[in-house]
Amino acid sequence: MHFTKLVPNIFYENIQDGLTLFVDCLSFSIGYNDLNSEHPCCVVNKDNLSVFLFQNKEWADKDRPEIRLHTDNIEEVFAKISVTHPQFLHPNLNKVTLRPWGAKEFALRDNTNVCVIIQQWH
């Protein structure tokens, strides 16, 4: 058995919140676009990553995910985000921190409590 990609689904009451985090802050681009439909959704992509964003209040109320993005230059990512989108820095992990398990991490949290941990392993 061989898998090539994991694509999480993230639900928002207002899909614009997801676009602000993933497109504006994290520089993903919109691939598949069905934003003007009765049930807005899209796939955002960056490098070999994809995330499926849905506008669905019922599911957004039930699930506020936490996902991790690995990078090979966490200082560069932090420097950019801390200048362009400091409002997304998670209050509990708002600077690059060496964690007990050996990874450097900082975290982002949007206004709907979706959490993205940026991580670099040595």
Image (spheres, rainbow, N blue to C red):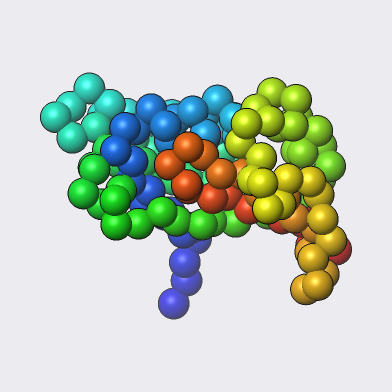
Residue 79 screen position, x and y as percent: 80, 33
For this view, does 119 lie left or right of residue 11?
right
- Place of residue 50 in the rendered image (x, y in percent of width and height, measured from the top left): 47, 45
Residue drawn at the location 66% of the way across and 46% of the way down: 91
Nearest the viewer among 94 and 26 is: 94
The reply to whether residue 41 is visible in this rendering is no
Q: Position of residue 67 (x, y in %)?
A: 53, 56
Q: Is residue 73 left or right of residue 28?
A: right
Residue 69 vs residue 99, the one in the foreground: 99
Name the quadrant containing residue 26. top right
Q: Residue furthest left?
A: 38
Q: Quadrant of residue 122?
A: bottom right
Q: Can see residue 110?
A: yes
Q: Residue at x 47, y 71 (%)?
A: 2
Residue 13 relative to residue 92: left or right: left
**Residue at 77%, 39% in the rendered image:** 78
Point out residue 24 in the picture as x, y percentages from the top left corner. Answer: 55, 25
Location of residue 3 with respect to 79 vertically, above or below: below
Q: Is residue 114 above or below residue 103?
A: above
